[in-house]
Amino acid sequence: MDLYEYEAKKIFSEGGITVPPSVRITKPEELSKVNFGYPVTLKVQVLAGGRGKAGGIKFANNLKEGQELAQNLLKMVVKGSKTESLLVEPKLIIKKELYLAVTLDRERGCPIFIASAEGGIEIESSDKVVTMPIPYPYHPFVGRELARQLGFTGSLLVKVADVATKLYKIFEEKDLDLAEINPLMITEGDEVLALDGKISVNDDSIGRQRYFDGWQIRHLADLPERERRAKLQGLNLVELDGNIGILCNGAGLTMATMDMVKKFGGRPGNFLDVGGGSDQEKTLEALEIVNDNPECDVMLLNILGGITACDEVAQALVQFIKKYPERILVVRLRGNNQDLAEKILAESGLKLIPDLEAAVKEAVEKSKSVSKKPVGAKA
Amino acid sequence: MILIDKNTKVMVQGATGKMGSSHTKRMIAYGTKIVAGVTPGKGGTQVHGLPVYDSVKETVEQTGATCSVIFVPPYLALDAGLEALEAGVELIVLITEGIPPQDTAKLVAQVKQRGARLVGPNCPGVITPGQCLVGILPGQIFSPGKVGMISRSGTLTYEIALALTDAGLGQSTCVGVGGDPIKGIGYQELLEMFNDDKDTEVIVLIGEIGGTAEETAAEYIKRNVKKPVVGFIAGVTAPPGKRMGHAGAIISGGKGTADSKIAAFKENGMHVAMTPSEVAVMVAEARKQLAKA
């Protein structure tokens, strides 16, 4: 779950990291609440990155100018992400900017600091990046070593190290995937503060983080409707632009099935993993979600029943076909209780193809003949 | 064979839960030497005719188990894993999906420190066909033979095992390393073991998008592995920035694409299959070449 900037800053601040004073507004009139004087910075609160380049950050010299800007900024959409609110802060004079983040490194298998003495940039494009594995349990010397490697000395070394330590503590306590300050700014008076930040909460950990109770729904706002629906059902759906709807059990097999559709000349319309040991109800919901995609001409169901019982999947299919008799469906089922499934499907007129390649080829074939029909011919 | 054989004594942590119980039954039916279940507070009871103990330490003392398969809920998995390590368990197979990755990182660090082995998390487990099944793999799909398998996936592994078995190509051991970004045993350690294993002639490596482990493995294979390796990568059609079911299956910042992995496989002399059934064809071909040599 990605958080908005204002949420990240609230968490930084609660963790002892200094952030600029700010006011969050959802209407231009609310700008009168600003009590830190002008000029101010107005920043759109969106979940997508790249808002600066998209024109989502503006400066205002007075209330009138600010309100005019706010009017437009509040309506802004950045890469499909709607503006939730505006964060208004004093325009600050920057002496130096840094990049500082904590994340998990999958190759090393542990948390790491990523930092750069150049801030406010795309970290991937900086050549002055310092990365440092973080041993567990954490000790503050790690933060000091990081600050030293960034080139700091004296009181700034201590201050930057302190921010790094606090950022790690937040990362660990809140079960984050990413805690990023970019830029971490140093003022003329050698104050160190988080000017912008990004927090990504680990999805598997939200259940034990009471702090984020109830946050998830409003942070799914940017997901396309069907992906959102799937997520709320505990299903993993990713939509593509093809016309063959795909449902499988298991993430690897689902990807492999998509790849085969493409290899044999078809266009995969989605990734949908119905999961291992899915019951009838969940399978049916998965079928409904794919069916609702208007781009979908053919549905390909591929279940390899190791643990999953094929007959239960077949029951869900029978229900589905009763509801949508015109839907073109190619079914590959193999494994546990395959015979039972075959019998159940035969009664409803559905053919079962046990061979995966044969099933994929059939789905591709059918998707092509459907696509050739003129618009409107489709049921 | 590697990791497990017919003599491996296995305990089940979480054997009295719904999933743990049903898979304990399956593992026993397959012939795995399951010696006990562990559920705190249920010591003294039984599960499928086996004793249940309150702690791993007690189980090790009473049974001499060296391997533990863990089915506990995600937020209890770190504790369960650390308990197994502390009791001296040598091989931990962690099936649980949805463990906070920071917990996994903490467990992995301890596993390394103690020189133990962790398979998983979020994995189907390990099978040495005909001898021992530890985890949730469907035993009937596998058959004993000379192919060693390493995979990040569950059902895709079964699909490929099925193709191999259908083609009369049995397996020495099959290891599902799991779909999480942070995990225990990885490609390199397993490649090394299969390379040294006299029962393994050909190795199959099943990877997917996300991370750079396949690229690293390909370089390792070129330098160190003497046996033929057939590779398969899932996710050629996966869009960047989207998590494809597995927590670790995501292309981010341009890294982790299927194309990069396939290219690395090819550059390092591996055979690359484009469909599951092609894996079996390539394995058969590799064995033919070996027979000629």
Image: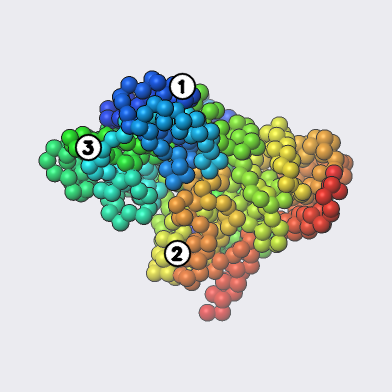
Kindly identify which residue carries mark 3. Answer: A187
Decide which of B205, B34 is in the foreground and name it. Answer: B205
Subunit bearing disc 3: A
The dot on residue B218 is 2
Give how far across and how far down residue A19 sits, in percent.
30, 30
Give how far across and how far down residue B187 sits, in percent.
44, 56
Amino acid type at circle 2 is: Ala
Give how far across and how far down residue B291 sits, in percent.
56, 76
**Element under disc 1:** helix
Residue neighbourhood size for the residue with mark 2, other residues' Cα within 10 Å, grouped as few (<14), some (14–19), many (≥20) = many
Decide which of B182, A228 is in the foreground and name it. Answer: A228
Tell me where residue B188 sits by quadrant.
Answer: bottom left
Question: Is residue A4 shown left or right of residue A328?
Answer: left
Decide which of A206, B173 is in the foreground and name it. Answer: A206
Amino acid type at circle 3 is: Thr
Q: Is residue B254 above or below residue A13?
A: below
**Element under disc 2:** helix
Subunit bearing disc 1: A
Tell me where residue A275 sits by quadrant.
Answer: top right
Mark closer to the chain start, 1 or 3: 1
Q: Kindly identify the residue that appears in the image at 24 percent across and 43 percent down.
A: A96
The dot on residue A29 is 1
Q: Kindly identify the residue that appears in the image at 42 percent across and 43 percent down.
A: A52
Subunit bearing disc 2: B
Residues flagged by tags 1 and 3 on a common chain: yes
Q: Kindly identify the residue that appears in the image at 74 percent across and 43 percent down.
A: A294
